[in-house]
Image: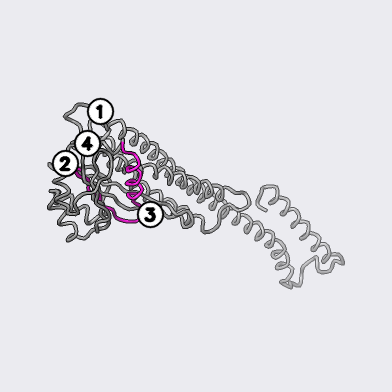
Amino acid sequence: MIVDCAIYRDGRRTPGPGDISDALDLCRLQDDAFVWIGLYEPTAKEFDKVTEEFGLHPLAVEDALNAHQRPKLEVYDDSLFMVLKPVGYEPDSDVVTSGEVMVFIGDSFVVTVRHGEEAPLAAVRRRLEHEPEMLRHGPTAVLYTIADAVVDHYVDVADELGTDLDELEAEVFSPARGGSRHTASRIYTFKRQVLEFRRATGPLAQPLERLADTGLLSSRVPFVHDKAQPFFRDVSDHLTRVNEAVEGLDRLVSDVLSAHLAQTSVRQNDDMRKISAWAAMAAVPTMIAGIYGMNFEHMPELTWQWSYPALIAAMAALEVLLYRLFKRRGWL
């Protein structure tokens, strides 16, 4: 459905005709005006009129309707199409959620399509409407502000993931706890969330690099203001730091998982040594008692008065000797 439709002239929102085609025609008659239409999870029927009036490419329209796209930037004859994936993080459940924002930019128009609850378009529109100097740059300002808002939120999510990973790491290496039996499952789930975050941030690097390109005029992206490259370069720099942070999180969580598995293996080996030591200590008196329990007639110790206490003392001495030996070697 259409969430908002507004005409902006000279950096300010102005009243205009309610019909989409009339709004676009009015903007094209004025050099400093453009129309911005915002849609939320539109159906194909709802999007047909927008497609027809703005001449959007059918492949881009298909992507906008179906969602589930990777971040990308595509240039068509009459428009520029960009996909971004805003993300959110729920610390209580340790779940990374993502949405999608599709942005069409063309001659005097911007069309934004939002999927999911993570897209910050309402806040972006309010921010721009309070910054007329920025809004005077037209559709490019809308694209930049959306990208800036999405990447800034990436930074916040990366910080929250880092905090949770620190807590998970402390749990694994805590001498008192050493990780519970559910720790491996938590680490693996956390790694899945980092991967989901990486799917949003990683592919966005190349589109932002194209928008930030300061090379020859022929290599620049059409429908983007000539002086917008420094702004997109700033967003690209922020995204680079986010991607470096995500890569570091991915490596660290893999190391934490390996350390936890190694600790588990060491604990299992310690348990096996303890069991073996106690079994050896139990075997000695069992063997001696078994020998003297066979009731043979010709056993020299049977007629000796001190044979019973001597055997008990011998078994006790052997038990003490074995205990001290295993204790010295760290088996007990």
The range drawn in magenta is 105-132
The residue that mark 1 highlights is 214
- The front one of 108 and 168 is 108
Distance between the alpha carbons at the discs numbered 2 and 1: 22 Å
User: Which disc is residue 97 wearing?
Assistant: 3
Vertical side of 43 occupied by 76: above or below: above
The residue that mark 2 highlights is 107
* Residues marked 2 and 1 touching at CB (< 8 Å): no
User: Does residue 111 belong to the magenta stretch?
Assistant: yes
Three-letter amino acid code of the residue under disc 2? Asp
User: Does residue 258 belong to the magenta stretch?
Assistant: no
User: Which disc is residue 224 wearing?
Assistant: 4
Taking the spot 73% from the left edge, 71% from the top edge, the residue there is 293
Q: Quadrant of residue 234?
A: top left
* Residues marked 3 and 2 touching at CB (< 8 Å): no
- x, y (%) of residue 224? 22, 36
Distance between the alpha carbons at the discs numbered 2 and 4: 10 Å
Taking the spot 40% from the left edge, 41% from the top edge, the residue there is 247
Q: Tell me the mark number nearer the camera, choosing from 4 and 1.
A: 4
Q: First in sequence: mark 2 or mark 1?
A: 2
